[in-house]
Structure formats: structure tokens, C-alpha cells
């Protein structure tokens, strides 16, 4: 696990600005391209990253009622609607202007929006052959969140029982309580790839090694 406890909100602000700097380089065709989020374009992902402050609260409630309480469907519809209302450039400008925004989802810690910007930034950029140099503290902090109990509500896609996870580019490792420090089926690879698979992105499988990869994919 991580040794330090960095200021998570400062990490969020830094990573939002890093992402915006890369998004400034995208073309019109890039914005229309499919992301790793099923059914979402790069534009929709960018709109989603501003939803916490830019989305209409009444609209969110209406969409929640329409979706009969399904939060995932609510977020999907609200993000699409926001993308229809704002251009990609407006989404990027808003994300940069609100880089230090401290809004967090109900019952969630600040590690949740940090994980959101890292994962969704990669969802948007990876299909375009682009990336940002995410800070190691941010990566380790997001991974700590993803293996914790709160991430099981809307973030992590599968059980981690019997697994051991290890990042190869930052000083981070974790083992499921049922296997101890050195047991379990290993999943090893770049931190962002580990995080991506934990949230259900099969596109990261080629970046990962170890017998735990197939085990985890089978649970998605």
C-alpha cells in the first residue's frame, strides 16, 4: 500500500489540468471517436467529467426517476444530455476552470473523483493512441481506493478474492485478505492498466501478466 497520504484534492486538480492540456490537442474527428466507455464518444466522456457541477440537479433527479432508481442509467443519460448542450471545447474549459472543485459523490471519499478523472481520461485518450503522464501518487491513491470496500459501490467491477495485485511502474502492491502478502493469483502491470481492469475495461488485458488476469476477467 502507499506510504504517504497526499492531499487528494491537490492530486485531483493536478490531474484534471494534465488531462485538459492533452485534450486541447484533439481534433474534431478525435472528439467523435468511440471511447472505452460503451456507447460514449470522447466528447461524452469529457462532458461526464464536468457533470458534478455542470449538470442540472433537477435534470439528474428527473433522469433518476425515469431510470427507476438505476444510478448507472441516470449518469449515462445525464452525460449524453450534457454533451449535447456543450461543445468539446466548452467541456475542456469547464473542467480546467473547476480543476479545484471539491464535489464528491454521496458517501464517497475524494479518491472517487480522482479515480474518475484518471480512468475516464484514459477511456477517452487510449483509443486515440494518446495518454498523459499521470503522477505516481495519484495512481497509487486511486488503486488504494479501488481495492477498498467503498469502490465496490459503482467503481470496482468484480470480487478480488484470491488475487494479488502489483503495479510495475509505481511502488504499489496489494493482496486479498484471504491469501496473505505473498499468496494469491498475481495480476501485474502498469498501474493504470491494473486500475482499468478493476473497473471493467478489458482493453487493458494485453498490458497485464499473471495467472490472476484470467481469473479477474472471468468475474467481470
Image: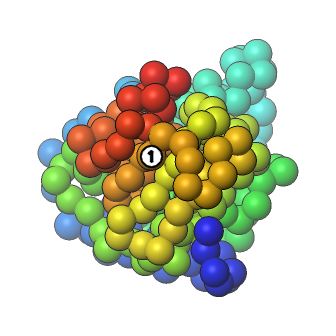
Is residue 158 visible from the viewing direction of this image? Answer: yes
Display colour scheme: rainbow
Q: Quadrant of residue 67?
A: top right
Query: Could you tell whether 33 is left or right of 151 in the image?
Result: left
Compared with 54, 17 (above or below) is below
Give the percent coordinates (x, y) of residue 154: 66, 37
Compared with 58, 107 (above or below) is below
Q: Residue at x 74, y 26 (%)?
A: 64
Residue sitting nearer the eye, 71 or 139: 139
Q: Residue at x 48, y 40 (%)?
A: 185
Q: Quadrant of the N terminus?
A: bottom right
Residue sitting nearer the eye, 175 or 3: 175
Give the percent coordinates (x, y) of residue 79: 53, 39
Is residue 88 visible from the viewing direction of this image? Answer: no
Give the percent coordinates (x, y) of residue 210: 35, 43
Q: Residue at x 56, y 48 (%)?
A: 183
Q: Quadrant of residue 99?
A: bottom right
How many numbered marks does the figure carry?
Answer: 1
Residue wearing tag 1: 186
Category of crowding for the residue at label 1, using alpha-carbon neighbours closer than 10 angstroms: few (below 14), some (14–19), many (at least 20): many
Give the percent coordinates (x, y) of residue 108: 77, 54
Label 1 element class: strand
Compared with 219, 90 (above or below) is below
Q: Residue at x 34, y 55 (%)?
A: 189
Residue sitting nearer the eye, 101 or 179: 179
Q: Quadrant of residue 34?
A: top left
Amino acid at each position: 500500500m502507499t506510504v504517504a497520504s497526499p492531499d487528494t484534492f491537490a492530486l485531483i486538480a493536478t490531474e484534471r489540468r494534465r488531462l485538459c492540456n492533452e485534450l486541447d490537442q484533439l481534433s474534431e474527428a478525435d472528439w467523435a471517436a468511440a471511447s472505452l466507455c460503451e456507447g460514449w464518444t470522447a466528447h461524452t466522456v469529457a462532458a461526464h467529467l464536468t457533470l458534478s457541477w455542470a449538470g442540472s440537479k433537477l435534470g439528474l433527479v428527473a433522469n433518476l426517476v425515469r431510470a427507476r432508481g438505476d444510478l448507472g442509467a441516470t449518469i449515462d443519460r445525464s452525460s449524453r444530455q450534457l454533451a449535447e448542450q456543450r461543445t468539446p471545447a466548452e467541456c475542456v474549459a469547464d473542467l480546467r476552470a473547476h480543476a479545484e472543485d471539491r464535489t464528491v459523490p454521496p458517501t464517497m471519499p475524494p479518491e472517487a473523483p480522482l479515480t474518475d478523472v484518471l480512468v475516464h481520461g484514459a477511456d477517452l485518450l487510449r483509443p486515440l493512441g494518446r495518454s498523459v503522464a499521470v503522477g505516481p501518487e495519484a495512481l497509487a491513491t486511486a488503486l488504494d481506493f479501488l481495492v477498498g470496500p467503498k469502490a465496490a459501490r459503482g467503481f470496482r467491477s468484480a470480487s478480488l478474492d484470491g488475487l494479488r495485485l502489483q503495479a510495475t511502474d509505481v511502488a504499489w502492491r496489494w493482496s486479498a485478505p484471504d491469501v496473505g502478502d505473498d499468496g494469491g493469483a498475481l495480476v501485474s502491470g502498469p498501474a493504470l492498466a491494473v486500475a482499468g481492469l478493476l473497473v471493467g475495461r478489458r482493453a487493458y488485458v494485453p498490458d497485464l501478466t499473471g495467472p490472476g488476469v484470467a481469473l479477474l476477467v472471468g468475474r467481470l
